[in-house]
Each structure stands twice: as C-alpha cells, then as structure tokens.
Image (cartoon, rainbow, N blue to C red):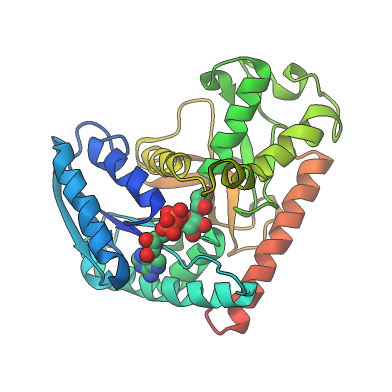
C-alpha cells in the first residue's frame, strides 16, 4: 500500500456527505490500495452532526481509513489536502433572490479558494459540488492564487450518469454497453445531454433508439428533458434532492480523474474553458473529457448537430450571465 491521501470534504454533515464519506473511506474513490485520511469541514452549527458522522465512520472499521478529523475552520481542514470536495454551500431559501444566492456562495467560495491556496498541497485537485457548482468553481479557482485553474472542476458527472442510464434503459442494454455520451454546459436545467457521438454496443445511439434525425423523436422529446429535469423529479419523488447518486457521481469523477477514463470512451466534467467548441475562455463549462493521473483533455473534433449547438449556446449564455452577476458583486 501507499501513503494515505488526505481528502477534505465540506458540507460533511449534509445529505450528500452522509452518502459520500463511507464510499471514500471504503476505497471506492481512490482504489483498494490507497489509505485515506478524511477532513470533515462544516459550519459551526453543524459541527456536532459532523462529529456524529465521524463516529459512524469509526464504527464502519474501514481498513483503508487512516483517520478522520472534524472542524469548522477551512485552513485546518485544507492543510496538506490532496483532494478537496467542496460539497457544502448555502441553499436557496424562501424569498432569496438569485443574486442573494450568488452573493452568499460567492463569499464561501472566495474564502475556500484562498484557504486552498494557502494550506492545501500545491498539487491538490478540487471538485465543486455545491450549487451553483460551475460558477462556485470559477470563484474558488480565481481566488486560489498559485494553484492552476486546471486543477479545479465542477461536478456534472451526475448529469452524465443520468444520461447514460436513460439511454441504456431505452436500448435495453447494461450501462457498460454505452459510450461517448456528453453533457455540455452548466449543471442546471440548461445543460445539454448529447447523444450525437454516443454508441450502444458499438452502434450509433440515435439509430439504436430509433431517432436518427436531428431534433425529433425520443431524443429531443423525452431523453433531453428527462435528463435536464431529473433533479426536480427526484425531489418530487423523494421529498429531498439527489444524495446517494450525487455522492456516487463524485466518487466516479475523482476516480476517473486520477485513475483514468476507460479506453475508447470519455466522461463529462465541468472544467475551465480554453475556448474549445466556441465556449468563451475562462468559463467553467461541462465538456467531454478524457482523464488520467489528475489531468484532463477535452475530446477534440466532435460534430455537434443543430440541437446540440443551440443547447450548448443557451447553457453558455447562462454561465456568462452568472459570471457577470459575480463580477457585478466584485467577486471576480
Ligand atoms: P445539505 O443541505 O444536506 O448539506 C449541505 C451541508 O453544507 C450542510 O450541512 C451545511 O451546514 C454545509 N455547509 C454550508 N456552508 C458551508 C461552508 N461554508 N463550509 C462547510 N460546510 C458548509 O445539502 P446536500 O443535499 O448535501 O447538497 C449539497 C450541495 O450539493 C447543494 O448545494 C446542492 O444544490 C448541490 N448538488 C449538486 C449536484 C451536482 O451535480 N453538482 C447534485 C446534487 C446536489 O443538488
């Protein structure tokens, strides 16, 4: 076995934290040979609850868990962190306007970006889950002076996994038969799940689902809105937002980032744009990426049909509006 990897998790007492922490400690995220040391960060009011989660982690007697520390100070939680999972954020409450939400989260992610730069390992990889995830990642990366923006990402893997699962179910195949799905844009209802380059057991997905032409049939009528609205459907059914699936997506995102996407396919991840596919430079946008060893590359040369192009443009417009709102608050 290797030396323990230090993983900091914010929002540790929340519902995603509760599903996520045991998965990390079990080795699902970094592999069965890598011990992990967990740092749980919470707000003071939820610190006691996070201590309770830490007690349960002890009670799991995970062989790979090298230690758990709980705190409400970002500097301490991020000290020497190799991986930082920024799950905690300020939820939207009744009467709160969008700009209030952006301001509240702007303050959190500005402070956490600085704390990461000052205390985390220089090679830390950061995943922002707390919403608005893409823009929170942009804020954190901007304030993390000295850390490469490429080492910050936002989670769109849940959207990606939802798209893969919907396609597999429609085609009547296991999810492992699906390749080449992409989620473009923002982690919001404007995201565009794209099957244009996807295959099912090696055959073009649009053909398999009986929808070979652009913008008609199952893909446009059912698949795209189902993936875009899946978060709302879970809330409707469960009375609470996605948690186990979100945690599982974080595990997948980090595992693939470090251990690599499988040969012959890619995943979706929101990363800082270098202008690829016409996405303005600097926006944190979901792209098709291949990953390995903590690095990522946007998959080049995909052809977007008219619906995908329009969907990406709409989502990018929303990302630009969020960036403008953050700039207007003086947070960038
Ligand atoms: P919960 O409200 O259950 O938990 C959030 C926790 O974060 C709370 O315990 C809170 O005390 C803590 N927190 C707030 N500010 C903090 C700070 N500054 N430092 C440390 N901890 C802090 O929410 P949960 O369901 O766990 O969701 C967490 C976030 O993930 C939300 O913003 C949610 O919208 C977002 N999601 C993002 C997804 C994605 O795919 N990117 C999908 C799932 C989820 O909706």
Residue at 15% in and 41% down: 59
Where is residue 297? Give x, y as percent: 51, 45
- Residue 83 to residue 217: above or below: below
Where is residue 63? Give x, y as percent: 13, 35
Query: In the picture, residue 275 is in which quadrant?
Result: bottom right
- Residue 129 to residue 143: above or below: above
Where is residue 13? Give x, y as percent: 32, 57
- Residue 214 to residue 56: above or below: above
Q: Nearer the viewer, residue 72 or 298?
A: 72
Report whether 12 appears left or right of 219: left
Report whether 165 appears left or right of 155: right
Q: Looking at the image, can residue 212 be seen? A: yes
Q: Looking at the image, can residue 180 be seen? A: no
Query: In the picture, residue 279 is in which quadrant?
Result: bottom right
Residue at 32% in and 56% down: 12
Quadrant occupied by the N terminus: top left
Report whether 110 appears left or right of 231: left
């Amino acid at each position: 076995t290797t030396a323990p990897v230090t993983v900091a998790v914010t929002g540790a007492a929340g519902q995603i934290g509760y599903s996520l922490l045991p998965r990390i400690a079990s080795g699902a995220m970094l592999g069965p040979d890598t011990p992990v040391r967990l740092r749980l960060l919470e707000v003071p009011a939820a610190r006691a609850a996070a201590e309770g989660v830490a007690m349960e982690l002890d009670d799991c007697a995970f062989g790979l868990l090298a230690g758990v520390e709980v705190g409400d100070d970002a500097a301490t939680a991020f000290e020497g962190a190799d991986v930082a999972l920024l799950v905690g954020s300020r939820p939207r409450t009744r009467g709160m306007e969008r700009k209030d939400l952006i301001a509240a989260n702007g303050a959190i992610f500005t402070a956490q970006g600085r704390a990461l730069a000052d205390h985390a390992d220089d090679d830390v990889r950061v995943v922002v889950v707390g919403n608005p995830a893409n823009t929170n990642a942009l804020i954190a990366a901007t304030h993390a002076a000295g850390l490469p923006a490429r080492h910050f990402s936002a989670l769109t893997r849940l959207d990606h996994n939802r798209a893969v699962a919907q396609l597999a179910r429609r085609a009547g195949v296991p999810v492992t038969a699906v390749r080449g799905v992409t989620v473009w844009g923002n982690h919001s209802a404007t995201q565009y799940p794209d099957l244009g380059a996807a295959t099912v057991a090696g055959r073009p997905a649009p053909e398999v689902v009986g929808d070979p032409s652009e913008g008609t049939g199952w893909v446009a009528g059912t698949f795209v809105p189902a993936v875009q609205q899946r978060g709302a459907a879970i809330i409707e059914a469960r009375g609470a937002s996605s948690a186990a699936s979100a945690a599982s997506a974080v595990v997948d995102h980090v595992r693939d980032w470090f251990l690599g996407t499988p040969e012959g396919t890619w995943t979706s991840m929101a990363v800082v744009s270098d202008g690829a596919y016409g996405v303005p430079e600097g926006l944190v946008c979901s792209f098709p990426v291949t990953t390995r060893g903590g690095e990522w590359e946007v998959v080049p040369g995909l052809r977007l049909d008219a619906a995908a192009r329009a969907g990406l443009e709409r989502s990018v417009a929303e990302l630009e509006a969020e960036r403008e709102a953050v700039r207007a608050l003086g947070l960038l």
